[in-house]
Structures are given as C-alpha cells and as structure tokens.
Image: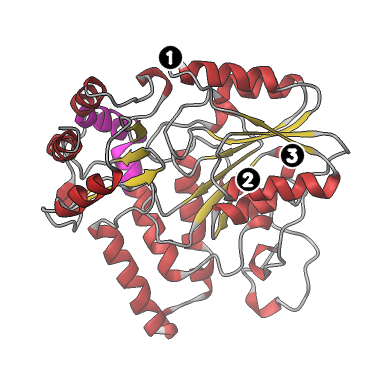
C-alpha cells in the first residue's frame, strides 16, 4: 500500500512545519474525539460499568500485540511510561558481581539510569559501546562493535532498535543470536520506532520490548506498553494492582483476596491502567497506525525526505548511510562554522519545529509532512551557510 499525505486527519495549521514527532506526536482528529468522549464519560460516572475497567483494556492489548506481531495479548502490559517498564524489567533481574550490562553510547536517560542502578546494586559493570568516530560506514561499524562486545560476561543487552537521537539502525536480529549464544537477556526500547518501523516479536524474540505510547503511536502523554517474554512469566510487579489479580472482574468478591495474578504480563500493568480517557485515545491511535501500516509510513517518510537528504549532504552535512538508519527519524550533523543561534532564529521565523542535539539536528516526520516541508527546512539551513 502506498500512502498519500494524511494532513487532513490532523489539526496542524498549514503555516506550521512540525518535524519533531520524536519528542511529542500531534493528536489527529479521531484521537481528539476519543479523548473528549472519555472526558464526558467521566462526567457521567453512572455510565461506567464493571466491564468498562476491563473490555477496552483487552481491546487495546490486542491492537498492540497485532502491531508488534505477538500472538498472545496476555504478554502485553499497560504501563504509564517507558521508564516504568524498564524499572519493571530491572526489578526482575538478578546479577552476580562483575557481570556486564551492555548499552550503547548516549542512550536515552531512562534507558541508562535504570541499568546504572542495577549494576551498582549487584556490583556488576556497564559496558557502553561507543559510536565510531569515523563517518564512513559508521552504522555498520557500530553494529559490528556491539556484536564483538557481547561475551560470556554479558548478562543483559539493553538498547533501542534504533538510536533515539540519530536514527541509527541496530541489527537486533544478529544481536539476539549473539545473546542467545551466551544466555543473555535482550531488552529493547521501541519508543522511537514501534508504529513507524516494522517490528516482529516472532522474528526478534526479545525478552522484553518497552515502548512509550505518546510518540509514534499517537497516544496521550502518560501512556506506554510493555511486551514481556517467558523469562518474566512469574516475576514481581512494582505494585499490587487489584485488577491484575485473577477474578478481579467480579467486583462483589474483591475482598476474597486472590493469591494469583492473571496470566503472564498482566501482573505488570500499572494501577488505574483502565483510564477511560487514555485508553480511548490509545485505541484510536493504534487503530489508525495499523490501517496505515508501519511499512507504508516508513516508505512515505523515505519519499518525502530523499531530496532534502541529498541537498544537505551536498552542502556539507553528514547523514548516516540509508542502509543503517531510519527514514522517519534521522540525525543531521551540521557543517562546522554554521551559526547555530542564527539557524534557530531562521527556523523560528519560518515556524519550523525540530530538535537540536549539540551540533546535530534531529528530524522526525510523519504522514502529515510533505516534500515542501523539507524544502522549507533546507532553504533555512542553506541560508545560514551563505
């Protein structure tokens, strides 16, 4: 399926060029409507029944399971943030002194601090694989360095399947094979990829996949998802949420305390995860993403960015080779000598919204963007070079 521009589904003003969905997604109109319906439902609580706490949550889990190609929705937990999911994972890992946790350089803070804390708890070590200094074949060499760093000391490999700041693709399929060889866990942060880049749990078989929901899945801020594999089937949740226990649907018997959790990852869902506003918005978001398909979204982003990428490269910018980066999110290293302050003022003047990361800019786009948006951006950058 080839996607056409979908800006008519959003409420972004025509004069705004928003290239920063990696920070926060805009809601499309169906998500707005779902959120309003949730607010009105709370205004009339007599319309909220026992099933309201469970059936929409099951529907949401099934949608996310479908998106990541997971057979069993019971392996999905509804969580409030990626950091909550990663903390749940770390809470169920026991290490020995001098075991190693492998990370990559400059991971997002939520996917660093949790492992630093776990390493300190067990006197284990962090093994951080640096991004190669050379620009030639950088993505390829970085992946090679990661694979070479996995050894019999490695007990956990935790990384995004793409780098959150520059879009570098990590070969998680090969990394999974290497971790299996040494019986190490593979924990993937899919916050910057799930929904915009095809991903299959069946193919990669991560031990856990944690994903923020307010970026590429168009949910409200404060929602996320966790997929938990067999390693975590009998683990300890961070909290004791009543609705995660067996037979919790029978509210009249809640004080007949139930010692058993619902199966698999249900135990890890956060308290009040049936949030009527959030769940309605999340469902609307994922339904639309599934209709578009991540593959078609990726192809659309490639189509609208390809000309701009060539222009930027021809004018001294560095962008990772297309075989080792994504098209929905990628970093651009600006030429030395470019006045960053002047560029920021030009972007503001042109109502272009992007992220700055040192001498890099991070561009992230979606189906509401166009080739014209990227021409507007390249015109701004070129004006700062001449």
What is the magenta range?
288-305
| Mark 1: few/some/many CA within 10 Å (<14, 14-19, 20+) | few
Q: Is 32 or 131 nearer to us in this picture?
A: 131
Residue lying farthest front?
337
Nearest to viewer (mark 3 / mark 2): 2
Under circle 1, the secondary element is loop
Work out how far the residue at label 3 is from the one at label 2, CA to CA, in angstroms.
Answer: 21 Å
Pick whichever of labels 1 and 2 is earlier in the sequence: 2
Return the x and y of residue 73 as percentages of the image width and height.
56, 46
- Label 2: few (<14), some (14–19) or many (≥20) C-alpha neighbours in 10 Å: many
Furthest-right residue in this view: 97
| Mark before the other along the chain sequence, 3 or 2 | 2
Q: Which residue, given by chain and number where applicable, does mark 3 sit on?
A: 231
Q: Nearer the viewer, mark 1 or mark 2?
A: 1
Q: What is the CA distance from the residue labelled 1 to the residue labelled 3?
A: 39 Å
* Quarter residue 148 falls in: top right
Which x, y percent locates residue 67?
44, 40
The answer to whether 252 appears left or right of 276 in the picture is: right
Q: Which mark is residue 112?
A: 2
Secondary structure that dominates the magenta span: helix
Quadrant where the image shows the C terminus: top left
């Amino acid at each position: 399926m080839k996607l056409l521009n979908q800006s008519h589904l959003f409420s972004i003003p025509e004069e705004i060029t928003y290239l920063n969905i990696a920070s926060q997604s805009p809601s499309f109109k169906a998500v707005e409507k779902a959120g309003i319906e949730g607010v009105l439902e709370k205004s009339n609580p007599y319309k909220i029944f026992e099933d309201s706490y469970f059936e929409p949550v099951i529907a949401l889990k099934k949608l996310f399971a479908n998106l990541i190609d997971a057979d069993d929705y019971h392996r999905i937990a509804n969580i409030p943030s990626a950091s909550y999911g990663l903390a749940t994972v770390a809470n169920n890992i026991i290490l020995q002194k001098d075991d190693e946790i492998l990370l990559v350089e400059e991971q997002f803070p939520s996917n660093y601090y949790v492992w630093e804390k776990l390493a300190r708890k067990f006197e284990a070590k962090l093994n951080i694989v640096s991004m190669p200094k050379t620009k030639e074949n950088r993505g390829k060499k970085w992946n090679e360095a990661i694979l070479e760093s996995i050894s019999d000391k490695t007990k956990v490999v935790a990384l995004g399947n793409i780098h959150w700041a520059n879009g570098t693709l990590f070969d998680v399929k090969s990394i999974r094979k290497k971790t299996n060889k040494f019986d190490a866990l593979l924990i993937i942060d899919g916050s910057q990829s799930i929904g915009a880049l095809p991903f299959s749990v069946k193919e990669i078989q991560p031990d856990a996949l944690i994903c923020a929901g307010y970026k590429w899945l168009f949910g409200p801020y404060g929602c996320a998802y966790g997929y938990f594999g067999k390693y975590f089937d009998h683990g300890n949740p961070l909290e004791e949420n009543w609705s995660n226990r067996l037979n919790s649907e029978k509210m009249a018997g809640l004080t007949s305390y139930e010692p058993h959790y619902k199966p698999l990852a249900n135990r890890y869902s956060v308290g009040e995860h049936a949030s009527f506003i959030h769940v309605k918005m999340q469902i609307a978001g994922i339904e639309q993403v599934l209709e578009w398909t991540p593959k078609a979204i990726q192809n659309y982003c490639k189509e609208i960015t390809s000309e701009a990428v060539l222009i930027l490269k021809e004018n001294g910018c560095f962008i990772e080779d297309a075989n080792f980066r994504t098209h929905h999110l990628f970093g651009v290293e600006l030429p030395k000598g470019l006045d960053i302050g002047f560029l920021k003022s030009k972007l503001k003047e042109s109502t272009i919204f992007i992220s700055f990361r040192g001498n890099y800019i991070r561009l992230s786009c979606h189906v509401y963007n166009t080739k014209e948006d990227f021409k507007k951006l390249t015109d701004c950058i070129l004006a700062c070079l001449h």
